[in-house]
Structure formats: structure tokens, C-alpha cells
Image: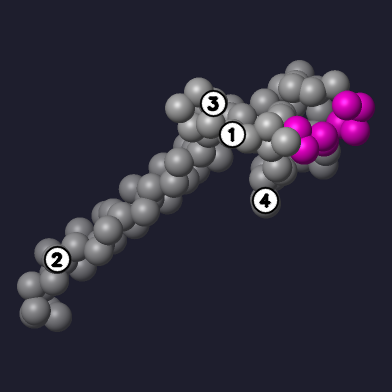
């Protein structure tokens, strides 16, 4: 099995915002605003990460049209054993590039 090395392979790193310090006042609109903005940033970063070509040794849980992955074993979406190989998702199946 070829492990993904984040220092050598382009791989997904998720962004999860830490909770902001709480002022103690539940009416503090600045805290609510900050949390909402960090959540929006997290969603944008997740979309960009999904769209970026990256090394993968397992299929994405929710493949989307246009995803590009550089396949490593044990994942073999083309079932032809010719790995490593770049593939893209055409909406129904993975196809060689």
C-alpha cells in the first residue's frame, strides 16, 4: 500500500477553525459574526480542496464531476492495475487522463 506523504504528495489538509474566545456575554454580536465568517472560510477552503488535483489512495466519499486525482494503490478505479495514474471523474465513473 502506498501511503500518502503530506510533505511529498499533494494531499488534502482540512481547515477547522478553533472556537473563538467567549466574552461571557451571549449577546456579543462580534463573536457570532466572527464564528459565521470562519465557518464561511472553512466551506470555501473545503470546496477548493475538493477541486484541487491531489494524490489519493482511496476514492473520495462524494466524487463530483471534474475531480482529478493521481491514483496510488490500493485504489484502482480503472481496474487495470496500471498505477500510479491520473484520473478524472466524469459524473458517473473515473476515467484516465
* Residue closer to the observer: 15 or 38: 15
Answer left or right for 64 relative to 31.
right
Question: Going by the image, does 90 lie left or right of 52?
Answer: right
Q: Quadrant of the C terminus?
A: top right
Q: CA distance from mark 1 to mark 2?
A: 35 Å
Residue placed under numbered mark 2 in the picture: 21
Image disc number at residue 9? 3
Q: CA distance from mark 4 to mark 3?
A: 21 Å
Name the quadrant containing residue 69.
top right
Secondary structure of the residue carrying tag 3 is loop
Task: Please tell me which of labels 4 and 3 falls first in the chain.
Answer: 3
Q: Residue at x 71, y 29 (%)?
A: 71
Q: Which residue is mark 1?
A: 4
Secondary structure beneath dot 2 equals: loop
- The label on residue 46 is none
Q: Residue furthest front?
A: 1
State the image coordinates of residue 43 (x, y, percent, origin top left). Answer: 42, 50
Residue 63 screen position, x and y as percent: 69, 45
Determine the CA span between mark 3 and mark 2: 35 Å
Q: Earlier in the sequence, mark 3 or mark 2?
A: 3
Mark in front: 3 vs 2: 3
Q: Is residue 63 magenta?
A: no
At a point 44% along the width and 46% down the height, the residue shown is 14
Above or below: residue 21 compared with residue 46: below
- Which portion, as a residue range, is magenta? 73-81
Q: Nearer the viewer, mark 1 or mark 2?
A: 1
Q: Earlier in the sequence, mark 4 or mark 1?
A: 1
Q: Earlier in the sequence, mark 4 or mark 2?
A: 2
Label 4, label 2: how far apart the Cα atoms are = 34 Å
Q: Are marks 1 and 3 in contact (CB under 8 Å)?
A: yes
Which residue position holds label 4? 62
Q: Note whether 34 is above or below 81 in the view shown.
A: below
Amino acid at each position: 500500500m502506498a501511503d500518502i506523504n503530506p510533505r511529498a504528495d499533494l494531499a488534502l489538509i482540512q481547515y477547522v477553525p478553533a472556537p473563538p474566545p467567549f466574552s461571557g456575554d451571549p449577546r456579543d454580536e462580534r463573536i457570532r459574526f466572527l464564528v459565521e465568517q470562519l465557518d464561511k472560510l472553512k466551506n470555501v477552503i473545503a470546496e477548493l480542496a475538493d477541486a484541487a488535483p491531489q494524490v489519493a489512495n482511496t476514492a473520495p466519499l462524494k466524487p463530483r464531476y471534474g475531480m482529478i486525482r493521481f491514483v496510488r494503490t490500493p485504489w484502482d478505479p480503472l481496474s487495470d492495475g496500471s498505477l500510479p495514474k491520473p484520473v478524472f471523474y466524469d459524473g458517473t465513473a473515473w476515467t484516465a487522463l
